[in-house]
Image (tube, helix red, strand yellow):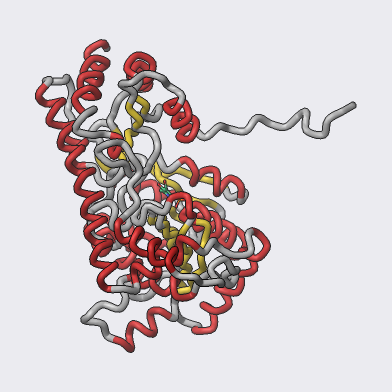
């Protein structure tokens, strides 16, 4: 009998998840996993945040019969208000209440299936209602950005981002390409902080110039925020670029995909939000945007999951838990910074050929090591050290115990060439 699917095109395998599987099935006791973007302790274990565990204990001790009920289509309203306030910096002590109430009315927020779902929802909404000719993504970018926009049928174009000779942000290249080639109404995808995979972010002065370009050329900024508070330890610092764009005058239309996977350690609970920001010229427009987002949500997944959003709203809504969360963020971000320093120190101690400063200058979960494909494959096959083909290493895979082993292996493969 003939099959309907015999001529299906092959679909790409996700490099990160398949590498993680290869690591898991490698019997070598020295193996080191630098593939997946998840936080790990010194012992290589997952780390539920203390603030999150406190809420979980509370939730388990309460007998709340409504705990498995559906959320509304837009998601949990209280969670969304907290998520929005965290992202845009509302409800601080020095707030101008009236100005802020007006600013909040510019934002349509809905719950998403974590950051991936927020990216998808934004892409689906914009593909329908903005109809951009192109989406501009950094070269390189998180591989899923390509998949998400490809599935919406929007042509992807790249703007230079990483300068391999300096291992730094190629600001001139990015600005020149967007200036000369981006068209009015195009979407420009920006990583709010801790760029994945390079760990290289624009400076504040550079962000201002990117914002000016978006305003002048009427480009639509799409911020992807997956590491707020996780990268620097400060949620305010990591949201600086988003807030700068948001507060521009005249107001800019933009959107933000917000993930709580890393900063709350809620990876598998798929906790996130999508915020679309209108320019505020017509107050009813925000509500119309929200309704249209809900229409997509209903047709695709009905509503977001409630466990993670319940935890996030409780933590953010309670001052003691929020203070604990800040300590949790500091613990995670400082361990990552310590491991960057430890790897750098080891490579310097070994006098490994090349320059390694970028390892300590880069920000967030990942380091773009600058290792070649050949070197990466040797690390994997001979030393059982797993990093992406691009040379991206997830820094939280390092520990005091394995960093000398990895540095020695890097030294070994670098000296072979
Ligand atoms: N965007 C970027 C740039 C990321 O690095 C990630 C996580 O790796 C995400 C979005 C979304 O992750 P999640 O769907 O788990 O929130």
Dividing the image into 4 quarters, which one contains the N terminus?
top right
Q: Position of residue 93 (x, y in %)?
A: 22, 80
State whether residue 190 is above or below residue 101. above
Q: Position of residue 117 (x, y in %)?
A: 53, 55
Question: Quick one: 34 or 71, which is closer to the camera?
Answer: 71
Q: Position of residue 128 (x, y in %)?
A: 62, 61
State whether residue 28 is above or below residue 90. above
Question: Quick one: 25 or 166, which is closer to the camera?
Answer: 25
**Residue at point 52%, 35% (across, down):** 14
State whether residue 300 is above or below residue 151. below
Horizontally, residue 405 falls left or right of residue 14, namely: left
- Is residue 186 in view? no
Rendering quarter of residue 211: bottom left
**Residue at point 16%, 20% (across, down):** 352
Q: Which residue ends up furthest to the left in the rendered image?
A: 349
Question: Quick one: 62 or 319, which is closer to the camera?
Answer: 62
Dividing the image into 4 quarters, which one contains the C terminus?
top left
């Amino acid at each position: 009998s003939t099959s309907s699917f015999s001529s299906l095109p092959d679909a790409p395998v996700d490099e990160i998840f398949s590498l993680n599987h290869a690591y898991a099935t490698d019997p070598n006791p020295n193996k080191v996993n630098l593939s997946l973007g998840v936080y790990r302790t010194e012992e290589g274990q997952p780390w539920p945040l203390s603030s999150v565990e406190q809420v979980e204990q509370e939730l388990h001790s309460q007998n709340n019969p409504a705990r498995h009920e559906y959320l509304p289509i837009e998601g949990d309203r209280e969670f969304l208000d907290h998520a929005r306030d965290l992202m845009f910096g509302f409800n601080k002590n020095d707030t101008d209440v009236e100005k802020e109430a007006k600013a909040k009315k510019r934002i349509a927020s809905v719950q998403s299936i974590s950051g991936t779902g927020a990216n998808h929802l934004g892409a689906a909404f914009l593909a329908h209602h903005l109809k951009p000719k192109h989406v501009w993504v950094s070269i390189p970018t998180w591989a899923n950005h390509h998949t998400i926009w490809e599935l919406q049928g929007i042509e992807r174009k790249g703007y230079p981002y990483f300068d391999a000779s300096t291992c730094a942000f190629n600001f001139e290249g990015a600005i020149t390409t967007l200036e000369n080639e981006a068209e009015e109404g195009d979407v420009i995808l920006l990583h709010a902080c801790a760029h994945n995979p390079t760990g290289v972010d624009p400076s504040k002065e550079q962000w201002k110039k990117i914002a000016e370009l978006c305003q002048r050329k009427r480009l639509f900024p799409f911020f992807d925020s997956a590491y707020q508070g996780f990268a620097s330890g400060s949620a305010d610092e990591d949201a600086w670029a988003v807030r700068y764009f948001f507060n521009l005058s005249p107001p800019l239309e933009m959107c933000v995909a917000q993930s709580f996977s890393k900063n709350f350690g809620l990876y598998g609970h798929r906790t996130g939000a999508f915020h679309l920001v209108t320019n505020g010229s017509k107050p009813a427009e925000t509500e119309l945007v929200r309704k249209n987002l809900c229409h997509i949500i209903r047709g695709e997944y009905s509503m977001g999951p409630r466990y993670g959003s319940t935890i996030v709203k409780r933590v953010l809504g309670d001052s003691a838990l929020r203070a604990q969360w800040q300590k949790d963020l500091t613990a995670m971000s400082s361990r990552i910074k310590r491991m960057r320093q430890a790897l750098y120190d080891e490579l310097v101690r070994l006098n490994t050929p090349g320059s390694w400063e970028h390892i300590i200058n880069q920000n967030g979960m990942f380091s773009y090591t600058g290792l070649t494909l050949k070197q990466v494959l040797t690390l994997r096959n001979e030393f059982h050290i797993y990093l992406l083909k691009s040379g991206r290493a997830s820094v939280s895979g390092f520990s005091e115990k394995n960093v000398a082993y990895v540095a020695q292996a890097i030294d070994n493969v670098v000296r072979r060439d």
